[in-house]
Amino acid sequence: MTARLSTTRLKELISAWLDRPEVRAALRDVHVHDRESQERVDRAASWFGLPSGSSTDQVRERIWRLFKDGAQWKRIGKRRLKESFDDYFAPVAGRHEFVDDFCGGSDAGLIERLAATGSFGECWHRCFVPNNDLGDNFRLEVVTTPDDTAVVGWVVILD
Protein backbone atom coordinates (compact mmCIF):
# COMPACT_ATOMS: atom_id res chain seq x y z
CA MET A 1 0.00 0.00 0.00
CA THR A 2 1.25 3.46 -0.90
CA ALA A 3 1.75 5.87 2.00
CA ARG A 4 -0.48 8.89 2.38
CA LEU A 5 1.02 12.26 1.55
CA SER A 6 2.18 14.12 4.63
CA THR A 7 2.59 17.88 4.92
CA THR A 8 6.35 17.29 5.16
CA ARG A 9 6.35 15.37 1.88
CA LEU A 10 4.18 17.99 0.18
CA LYS A 11 6.59 20.74 1.27
CA GLU A 12 9.40 18.76 -0.40
CA LEU A 13 7.32 18.58 -3.56
CA ILE A 14 6.55 22.30 -3.34
CA SER A 15 10.30 23.00 -3.38
CA ALA A 16 10.68 20.88 -6.52
CA TRP A 17 7.63 22.39 -8.26
CA LEU A 18 8.63 25.99 -7.60
CA ASP A 19 12.34 25.64 -8.38
CA ARG A 20 11.81 25.91 -12.14
CA PRO A 21 12.96 28.64 -14.55
CA GLU A 22 9.44 29.40 -15.78
CA VAL A 23 8.23 29.97 -12.21
CA ARG A 24 11.20 32.23 -11.49
CA ALA A 25 10.44 34.23 -14.64
CA ALA A 26 6.80 34.62 -13.60
CA LEU A 27 7.88 35.85 -10.16
CA ARG A 28 10.25 38.47 -11.58
CA ASP A 29 8.09 41.57 -11.08
CA VAL A 30 6.46 40.69 -7.77
CA HIS A 31 7.21 43.51 -5.30
CA VAL A 32 9.88 45.18 -7.48
CA HIS A 33 9.90 46.29 -11.09
CA ASP A 34 12.60 47.50 -13.44
CA ARG A 35 13.30 51.22 -13.06
CA GLU A 36 11.77 51.21 -9.57
CA SER A 37 12.77 54.13 -7.33
CA GLN A 38 15.39 53.24 -4.73
CA GLU A 39 12.90 54.20 -2.04
CA ARG A 40 10.48 51.50 -3.23
CA VAL A 41 13.31 48.99 -3.60
CA ASP A 42 14.44 49.80 -0.03
CA ARG A 43 10.89 49.28 1.24
CA ALA A 44 10.68 45.88 -0.47
CA ALA A 45 14.17 45.02 0.80
CA SER A 46 13.11 45.74 4.38
CA TRP A 47 10.14 43.37 4.06
CA PHE A 48 12.52 40.53 3.23
CA GLY A 49 15.32 41.25 5.69
CA LEU A 50 17.68 43.00 3.29
CA PRO A 51 19.49 46.24 4.07
CA SER A 52 18.61 49.63 2.64
CA GLY A 53 20.51 50.24 -0.59
CA SER A 54 19.96 46.70 -1.89
CA SER A 55 19.58 46.42 -5.65
CA THR A 56 16.46 45.31 -7.46
CA ASP A 57 18.26 42.09 -8.41
CA GLN A 58 19.18 41.41 -4.77
CA VAL A 59 15.55 41.84 -3.71
CA ARG A 60 14.38 39.59 -6.55
CA GLU A 61 16.90 36.91 -5.55
CA ARG A 62 15.76 37.04 -1.92
CA ILE A 63 12.09 36.78 -2.94
CA TRP A 64 12.94 33.86 -5.24
CA ARG A 65 14.79 31.97 -2.49
CA LEU A 66 11.91 32.42 -0.04
CA PHE A 67 9.25 31.57 -2.62
CA LYS A 68 10.79 28.31 -3.86
CA ASP A 69 11.57 26.93 -0.38
CA GLY A 70 8.80 24.52 0.62
CA ALA A 71 9.77 24.96 4.28
CA GLN A 72 8.65 28.61 3.95
CA TRP A 73 5.05 27.54 3.17
CA LYS A 74 2.59 26.69 5.96
CA ARG A 75 -0.50 24.58 5.54
CA ILE A 76 -3.64 26.45 6.56
CA GLY A 77 -6.29 23.90 5.63
CA LYS A 78 -7.19 20.40 4.49
CA ARG A 79 -10.62 19.24 3.33
CA ARG A 80 -12.44 17.08 0.80
CA LEU A 81 -13.35 18.92 -2.40
CA LYS A 82 -16.98 17.73 -2.37
CA GLU A 83 -19.17 20.11 -4.43
CA SER A 84 -16.33 22.59 -5.03
CA PHE A 85 -14.47 20.18 -7.31
CA ASP A 86 -15.39 22.29 -10.34
CA ASP A 87 -13.21 25.09 -8.91
CA TYR A 88 -10.24 22.85 -9.76
CA PHE A 89 -11.32 20.68 -12.69
CA ALA A 90 -12.68 22.38 -15.81
CA PRO A 91 -14.24 20.55 -18.77
CA VAL A 92 -12.30 21.43 -21.92
CA ALA A 93 -13.03 19.85 -25.32
CA GLY A 94 -14.55 16.66 -23.91
CA ARG A 95 -12.01 16.10 -21.14
CA HIS A 96 -11.11 17.72 -17.81
CA GLU A 97 -8.13 19.94 -17.06
CA PHE A 98 -6.76 21.18 -13.78
CA VAL A 99 -7.09 24.93 -13.29
CA ASP A 100 -4.11 27.22 -13.67
CA ASP A 101 -3.40 30.70 -12.34
CA PHE A 102 0.08 32.05 -11.60
CA CYS A 103 1.70 28.64 -12.17
CA GLY A 104 0.87 25.00 -11.60
CA GLY A 105 0.97 21.45 -12.81
CA SER A 106 -1.14 18.31 -12.93
CA ASP A 107 -1.25 14.62 -13.82
CA ALA A 108 -3.52 14.22 -16.86
CA GLY A 109 -3.74 10.43 -16.37
CA LEU A 110 -5.02 10.76 -12.82
CA ILE A 111 -7.51 13.41 -13.92
CA GLU A 112 -8.88 11.07 -16.61
CA ARG A 113 -9.25 8.22 -14.10
CA LEU A 114 -11.04 10.48 -11.61
CA ALA A 115 -13.37 11.76 -14.35
CA ALA A 116 -14.17 8.20 -15.44
CA THR A 117 -15.16 7.22 -11.89
CA GLY A 118 -16.81 10.52 -10.97
CA SER A 119 -14.46 10.83 -7.97
CA PHE A 120 -13.45 14.50 -8.16
CA GLY A 121 -15.47 15.41 -5.06
CA GLU A 122 -13.67 12.78 -2.98
CA CYS A 123 -10.24 14.31 -3.65
CA TRP A 124 -8.37 16.05 -0.86
CA HIS A 125 -7.54 19.75 -1.02
CA ARG A 126 -4.78 21.45 0.95
CA CYS A 127 -4.03 25.15 1.03
CA PHE A 128 -0.58 26.56 1.81
CA VAL A 129 0.54 30.18 2.19
CA PRO A 130 4.06 31.59 2.49
CA ASN A 131 5.11 31.98 6.09
CA ASN A 132 6.70 35.38 5.30
CA ASP A 133 5.83 38.70 3.64
CA LEU A 134 4.84 36.90 0.43
CA GLY A 135 1.82 35.51 2.30
CA ASP A 136 -0.34 38.47 1.29
CA ASN A 137 0.26 37.76 -2.39
CA PHE A 138 0.14 34.00 -2.93
CA ARG A 139 -1.50 30.77 -1.94
CA LEU A 140 -0.59 27.32 -3.18
CA GLU A 141 -3.37 24.77 -3.48
CA VAL A 142 -2.74 21.04 -3.82
CA VAL A 143 -5.34 18.43 -4.80
CA THR A 144 -4.61 14.78 -4.07
CA THR A 145 -6.37 11.53 -4.91
CA PRO A 146 -9.28 10.28 -2.75
CA ASP A 147 -6.90 7.88 -0.96
CA ASP A 148 -4.48 10.81 -0.44
CA THR A 149 -1.51 8.98 -1.97
CA ALA A 150 -0.82 10.96 -5.16
CA VAL A 151 -0.92 14.58 -6.29
CA VAL A 152 -3.53 15.23 -8.96
CA GLY A 153 -2.60 18.88 -9.40
CA TRP A 154 -1.20 21.99 -7.78
CA VAL A 155 -1.65 25.66 -8.48
CA VAL A 156 -0.15 28.88 -7.15
CA ILE A 157 -2.77 31.60 -7.04
CA LEU A 158 -1.76 35.24 -7.13
CA ASP A 159 -4.07 37.20 -4.83
Image (tube, helix red, strand yellow):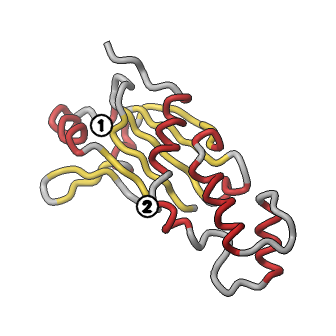
**With 140 as the anchor, is 74 left or right in this view?**
right
The structure residue drawn at horizontal position 77% and vertical position 59%, both measured from the top left corner, is: 48
For mark 1, give the secondary structure: helix
Image quarter of the C terminus: bottom right
The structure residue drawn at horizontal position 81% and vertical position 62%, both measured from the top left corner, is: 50
Q: CA distance from mark 1 to mark 2?
A: 20 Å
For mark 2, give the secondary structure: loop
Image quarter of the N terminus: top left
**Callout in the foreground (1, 2):** 2
Query: Which residue is identified by label 2?
Result: 101
Which of the two residues, 30 or 101, is positioned nearer the viewer here? Answer: 30
Q: Amino acid at mark 1?
A: Phe
Q: Look at the picture and state if 135 lies above or below 5.
A: below
Query: Which residue is identified by label 1?
Result: 120
The structure residue drawn at horizontal position 42% and vertical position 21%, both measured from the top left corner, is: 4
Q: Earlier in the sequence, mark 1 or mark 2?
A: 2
Q: Amino acid at mark 2?
A: Asp
